[in-house]
């Protein structure tokens, strides 16, 4: 089992920045993909960014050039640096990791951007 704990959400004005963190614990050996998703009220959960361990990254078009996903050297923490935030970025942000055939989700952290 893998446990995920997100942090770093909050309220920020449009144009501001936040950095989200997600710490993975438990049976983390073999995690091969880490990512961030978000769900706004009344909308489906959507991909924000993913990073393949020792591989590349992929971003939703809506966040390209503004958000950056990265991991720490131990590959047990994934970050999402969010710059130039917009009101439409308001959502609950969830961390997800893939390990073999399994997937694990965090509880989510709220991001609210005021215009």
Image (tube, helix red, strand yellow):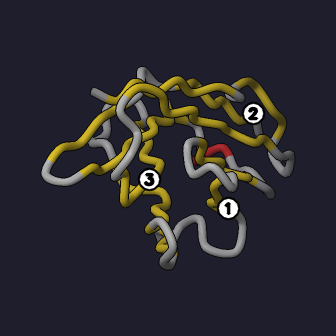
Query: Which badge, 2 or 3, comes first in the chain's sequence?
Result: 3
Mark 3 crowdedness (10 Å alpha carbons): few <14, some 14-19, many ≥20: many
**For the residues marked 2 and 3, what is the alpha-carbon distance in whole angstroms?**
28 Å
State the SS at label 1: strand
Discs 2/1, front: 1
Using the image, determine if residue 83 lies above or below residue 115.
Answer: below
**CB atoms of marks 2 and 1 within 8 Å:** no
Q: What residue sits 59% from the left and 65% below the top? A: 63
State the SS at label 3: strand
Where is mark 3, residue-wise? 34
Q: Residue at the far left: name it.
A: 101
**For the residues marked 1 and 3, what is the alpha-carbon distance in whole angstroms?**
15 Å
**For the residues marked 2 and 1, what is the alpha-carbon distance in whole angstroms?**
18 Å
Q: Quadrant of the N terminus?
A: top left
Residue 88 in the image: state x and y as whole percent: 58, 47
- Near-viewer residue (31 or 61): 31
Q: What residue sits 53% from the left and 67% below the top? A: 62
Where is mark 2, residue-wise? 114
Query: Which badge, 1 or 3, comes first in the chain's sequence?
Result: 3
């Amino acid at each position: 089992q893998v446990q995920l704990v997100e942090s770093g959400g909050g309220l920020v004005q449009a144009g501001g920045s936040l950095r989200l963190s997600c710490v993975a614990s438990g049976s983390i050996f073999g995690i091969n993909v880490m990512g961030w998703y978000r769900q706004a009220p009344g909308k489906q959960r959507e991909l924000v960014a993913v990073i393949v361990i020792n591989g590349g990254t992929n971003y939703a078009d809506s966040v390209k050039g503004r958000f950056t996903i990265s991991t720490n050297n131990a590959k047990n923490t994934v970050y999402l640096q969010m710059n130039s935030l917009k009101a439409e970025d308001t959502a609950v942000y969830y961390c997800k990791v893939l390990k073999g055939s399994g997937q694990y989700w965090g509880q989510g952290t709220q991001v609210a951007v005021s215009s």
